[in-house]
Image: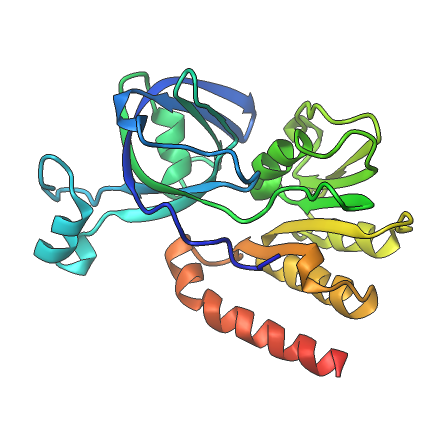
Amino acid sequence: MATEPARKGRRLHRGTVLRTERLTPHMIRVVVGGPGLAEFGAGAFTDHYVKLLFPQPGVAYPEPFDMEKVRAELPREQWPSTRTYTVRAWDAEARELTIDFVHHGDKGLAGPWAAAARPGDEIFFNGPGGAYAPSADAGWHLLVGDESALPAIAASLGRVPDGAPCRVYVEVAGAEEEQDLPAPPATEVVWLHRGAGRIGDLLVEAVQKLDFPDGEVHAFVHGEAEFVKALRRHLRVERGLPMDRLSISGYWRRGRDEDGWQSSKRDWNAQVEQEEAEALS
């Protein structure tokens, strides 16, 4: 399984906010729909993602909105900012797309937009991309992530084959951030509350201590880049797992917005792979 989600589905879609819901103190659900989603489709993967487009303040964009014209006619600093979000659910019959947003006050772009969104608001986005779904032939499944990976983990639980053991570790700030996660009978969900601790430390510790069940694992590990790096090394070097049994990548990195993280992610991944190759040699 590739560490980078497949970059495909670049078609531009125009979604209209239908409703919103505050799931936890820091998680907001936004459901969009409308005729602008007529050509949207998802379902092959459980880590489907879309790239939301947020206009720059004060910039007049072409009508109808066209990113090709924007790129051709406007300077780079006036292009809309993009933020990547997982598809929590897609209802093709109702033509409704559900996206869950982590919200920390006025910080960032997407979270404040979700908090202020009202029915009738519009959002443009590209997608979907994606690369992972729980393998039907795996002996067991391992799903690990922080809040940013929670929507993909929740979607993935709905596709874990009945009877296949599944171990799930989700780290959140505290008990108030837990959500109901419908899961198959053989699934064990463990919520880890970091409090004032560093993001991901509890996840690394939990996986390192896990007594792996018998059989070949299919693992999904996503979230903040530093803990993902530590778990990738543990799973690849210490556990000896091949890459084709892993979907593992940093969704974000502490101290950087998405623009900064995406611009440096290729170099980051190259360094991780080099260090890993040296450890395995």
- For residue 142, above or below residue 190: below
Residue 152: x and y in percent read 58, 38
Residue at the spot 8% in from the left edge and 55% down from the top edge: 73
Residue 253: x and y in percent read 52, 57
Residue at the spot 66% in from the left edge and 78% down from the top edge: 275
253 left or right of 263 in image: right
- For residue 233, above or below residue 63: below
| Quarter where residue 190 is shown | top right
Figure quadrant of the N terminus: bottom right
- For residue 114, above or below residue 266: above
126 left or right of 173 in image: left
Q: Count of labels shown?
A: 0
Residue at the spot 81% in from the left edge and 50% down from the top edge: 206
- Front-most of 59 and 15? 15
Residue 71: x and y in percent read 16, 55
Residue 163: x and y in percent read 83, 31
